[in-house]
Image (spheres, rainbow, N blue to C red):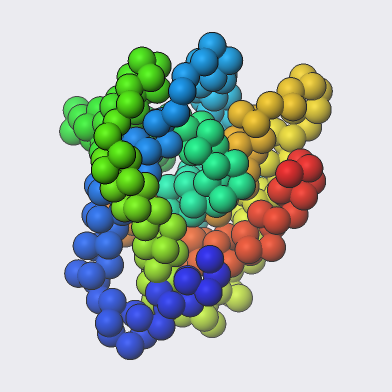
């Protein structure tokens, strides 16, 4: 995946991928490949245990996102200004889309993608409510509409009945959703590489606060959830999936929101760059710690 990121960097440096191409790739991923990956992941026989796991995934997603937010808020208290807001946003919102889905799929398979889809539902709700409030202190009807009509959320609306009622999709449709859905991983890594290629390398080493935030995001929060896993003695793949998702780097929306709200946009891009780069080391460590 890191090598695919480098392809994104190369493509952007060589002007093969410009802003318009990058925007087009994001739309393809968010509106086509990722929703089809989600729908395909729900295409297996439903049993009572899986139903309980989905409910558990929904509850865990809410609780552990809030827990991560609380940990972030407490540990970032020494910082001030807009950079503190960006780091808090980055700590609260993991890259469960561009990076999370392909990595979870490679570790847990279709079942993990289902739980990640539930997490992504909660992520999207928080993103267009609490996420907007972090930067603007207000919430609009337009943002609520974005939650309900988000393509990935619509894919969950479609996927859950397919699973619950054991609807057998034609092989041609299943194959199509799988082939196109599997494009999510390479496209997402190319997008990340394109974003990272525009960060000034020199500026990365001037921002010590970024590394402090990365420590919270990539190590402290997932390990805190792991400690809870040990306390409650839950060895399910549901909580393991949530731990790995929370170990993902900062969401790409960190830099996008920073730019949209005109809040230290270069700093936002650096946060995405540093957490993504460090996650190459930290994700395998977290996966090893939880025994996968």
**Residue 233 position (above or below residue 209):** above
Counting from the top left corner in percent of width and height, residue 92 is at 52, 41
Asked whether, in this view, residue 107 is left or right of residue 266, the answer is: right
Asked whether, in this view, residue 155 is left or right of residue 10, the answer is: left
Q: Residue at x 53, y 66 (%)?
A: 1
**Residue 132 position (above or below residue 251):** above
Q: Quadrant of residue 60?
A: top right
**Residue 265 position (above or below residue 110):** below
Counting from the top left corner in percent of width and height, residue 202 is at 54, 82
Taking the view exactly as shown, the residue that stands out farthest to the front is: 171
Q: Quadrant of the C terminus?
A: top right
Counting from the top left corner in percent of width and height, residue 194 is at 38, 72
- Count of marks overlaid on the render: 0
Q: Residue at x 60, y 76 (%)?
A: 205
Q: Could you say which is closer to the camera, residue 23 or residue 200? A: 23
Q: Residue at x 41, y 31 (%)?
A: 42
Report if residue 199 is visible in the image.
no
Taking the view exactly as shown, the residue that stands out farthest to the top is: 48
Counting from the top left corner in percent of width and height, residue 140 is at 22, 31
């Amino acid at each position: 995946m890191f090598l695919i990121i480098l392809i994104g960097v190369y493509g952007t440096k060589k002007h093969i991928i410009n802003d318009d191409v990058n925007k087009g790739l994001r739309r393809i991923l968010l509106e086509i490949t990722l929703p089809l990956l989600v729908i395909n992941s729900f295409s297996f026989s439903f049993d009572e245990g899986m139903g309980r796991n989905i409910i558990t995934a929904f509850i865990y997603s809410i609780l552990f996102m809030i827990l991560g937010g609380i940990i972030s808020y407490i540990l970032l208290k020494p910082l001030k200004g807009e950079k503190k807001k960006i780091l808090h946003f980055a700590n609260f919102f993991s890259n469960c889309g561009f990076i999370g889905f392909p990595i979870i799929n490679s570790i847990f398979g279709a079942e993990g993608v289902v739980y990640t889809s539930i997490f992504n539902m909660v992520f999207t709700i928080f993103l267009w409510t609490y996420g907007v409030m972090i930067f603007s202190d207000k919430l609009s009807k337009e943002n609520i509409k974005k939650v309900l009509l988000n393509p990935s959320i619509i894919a969950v609306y479609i996927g859950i009945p397919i699973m619950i009622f054991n609807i057998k999709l034609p092989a041609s449709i299943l194959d199509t959703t799988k082939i196109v859905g599997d494009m999510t991983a390479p496209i997402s890594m190319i997008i990340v590489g394109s974003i990272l290629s525009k960060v000034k390398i020199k500026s990365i080493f001037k921002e010590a606060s970024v590394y402090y935030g990365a420590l919270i995001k990539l190590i402290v929060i997932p390990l805190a959830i792991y400690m809870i896993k040990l306390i409650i003695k839950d060895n399910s793949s549901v909580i393991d999936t949530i731990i790995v998702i929370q170990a993902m780097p900062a969401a790409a929306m960190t830099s996008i929101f920073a730019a949209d709200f005109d809040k230290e946009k270069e700093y936002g891009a650096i946060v995405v760059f540093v957490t993504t780069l460090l996650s190459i080391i930290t994700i395998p460590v977290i996966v090893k710690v939880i025994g996968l």
